[in-house]
Amino acid sequence: MCMASDPSTKTKDTDAFKQASKLGMNVVRTRAFSDGCSKPLQTSPGCYNEDMFKGLDFVISEAKQNGLHLILSLVNNWDDFGGKKQYVQWARDHGGQYLNSDDEFFSNVVVKGYYKNHVKEWIVEMAAEIKSIDKNHLLEIGLEGFYGESMPDKKQSNPGYEVGTDFISNNQINNVDFATIHIYPDQWVPGSDEARAEFVEKWINSHIEDCKSILGKPLLIAEFGKSSSSAGYTVEACQDRILNKN
C-alpha cells in the first residue's frame, strides 16, 4: 500500500505480484493498515488519507490481475505502522483515557470503539459518497438481514448461522434510507416445510418490528425464493400461497 500510493514506486507492486504468480504462489498477505505514522492510512480515529486508499485499491486490483488472493491485516500487535500502541495513544490524546499499558488495546472501551469504527468505516464512507452525488434517491445496503453483535439477543432469530453483517447497526447509519432482508428458507433452514414456513413468518415479522421500533425506516423484502427442485414443488402450492397469504 505504501509503495502503491507513490507513483514513483507503484510498479514495484506489479513486479512483485508477477514474480509471485510465476513461482506458483496464490496467496499474499499484506497490510491494509497504517495508523498515524509517516504514511498513514488512518491519520487519526476515523480520519483517512485518500492517497493511501488509492494505493490499497491498486494493490487489490493488481493482485486480482495476477490471480492472487489477499490476506489483508487490519492492525498490528507491534509498533510498526501504528499498531495497538497508536490506538492506545489516540485514546489518551482524544478520548481522555488514562491508560498504563498498550495491552489495554484489548480491553479499554474507547480503544475498542476506535477499532470497531475503523473496520466498519466502509459503509459509512460509501453511503456518504453516494449521497454527495445524488440526494434525490433512496439508498440501501443490500443486507440479507442477519443479526450481529449490536443486539446479541436477536441473533437467535438467525437461521443457525450469520455472515458478519449486523442488520441493526448497519441500517442505523444516517445515509441509509431503508432496510432490506432476503428469504431463502430451502437453503437456510433444514427440516420440514412446516419448519421453513415458521421461520419465514418469524423472520419477516421480526424485521418489520425492528424497522418500526428501532430503525424507524421502511423494509423491503429484496430477494426471496422457493427452490423448484424441492419434492412436490408447484407454483400454486408454494409461491402463490406465500405471496397471497396476507
Image: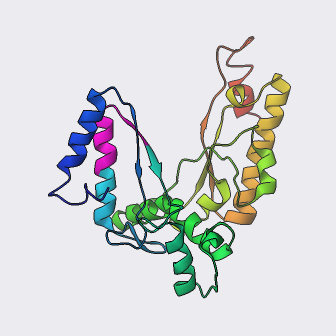
Dominant SS type (magenta): helix
Magenta includes 62? yes
Residue at image location 83% in from the left, 22% down from the top: 192
Residue at image location 33% in from the left, 26% down from the top: 24
**Where on the picture, by quarter, is residue 81?**
bottom left
Residue 227 relative to residue 34: left or right: right
**Where on the picture, by quarter, is residue 223?**
top right
Residue 230 relative to residue 27: left or right: right
Looking at this rendering, what residue extends furthest in the top direction?
Answer: 231
Which residues, given as a range, are shown in magenta? 58-70
Residue 102 in sight in this render:
yes
The answer to which of 120 and 197 lies nearer the viewer is 120
The answer to which of 91 and 168 lies nearer the viewer is 91
**Is residue 125 placed above or below 196 in the rendered structure?**
below
Residue 60, percent from left and from top: 34, 45
Residue at image location 14% in from the left, 58% down from the top: 8
Residue 99, percent from left and from top: 64, 82
Quadrant of the image for the C terminus? top right
Residue 131, percent from left and from top: 41, 65
**Is residue 2 placed above or below 92 in the rendered structure?**
above
Residue 173 in sight in this render:
no
**Where on the picture, by quarter, is residue 233?**
top right
Magenta includes 204? no
